[in-house]
Image: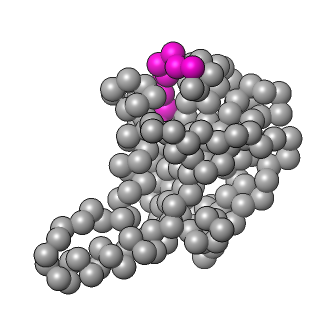
Amino acid sequence: MLLKQADLMFTFPKGFSEIKAINNDYFSFDFAMEGPEHNCEVWLMVRSQKQNWVSYEKARSDKKNELANPDSMYIDIGKAYATELADSRNFMARHIPADVLAEYNADAGKSYLLNLRDMQVIHHYKYALIVSLQKKHTGTLVAIFFTNYKDPDFYRDVNRVSHSFKFIP
């Protein structure tokens, strides 16, 4: 239902298995999966921005309330999780290039590469890659990939999961 509301298509990646998603006071995710050799985890958040966009437009026309632009939500969510997981600013952020965004029918995106704090909730993983994608006026997808090794196998898993999602044109 969340995928449909955010105009996202999803094909479950081969070799991955579903695990319980984290949903507590600090982390709220809709779905989670584990890599084929249990060497990585992926946490996913999907949010529709359609109703937020309607509320934003109404507030702008009323000039009573000033709301944050829902199309910038992908930045705020990604940065918030990066800050929490990496303990302040111990991460590198980059804009996702237009040609890569086009593969996902996304309009904007950022990635964050982190050295993680030692935390039980993330099973003491050492590194994370956060990918945050936005389709204007439509939806936001945030995926966090956790690993202990930034090796080719990890990036192959990232690639497999990443290509499982696409915004509907």
Read off the magenta span.
Answer: 112-120
Residue 3 position, x and y percent, is 64, 65
**Horizontal side of residue 126 vs 87, given as left or right:** right
What residue do we see at 70% from left, 40% from top? 20
Residue 98 position, x and y percent, is 49, 59
Magenta-span inclusion, residue 90: no
- Number of callouts: 0
Screen quadrant of the C terminus: bottom right
Q: Closer to the camera, 98 or 168?
A: 168
Residue 23 position, x and y percent, is 56, 42
What residue do we see at 75% from left, 29% from top? 153
* 91 over 165 or under it: above or below: above
Q: Furthest-right residue in view?
A: 15
Magenta-span inclusion, residue 116: yes
* 161 over 113 or under it: above or below: below
What residue do we see at 43% from left, 75% from top? 51
What residue do we see at 29% from left, 79% from top? 57
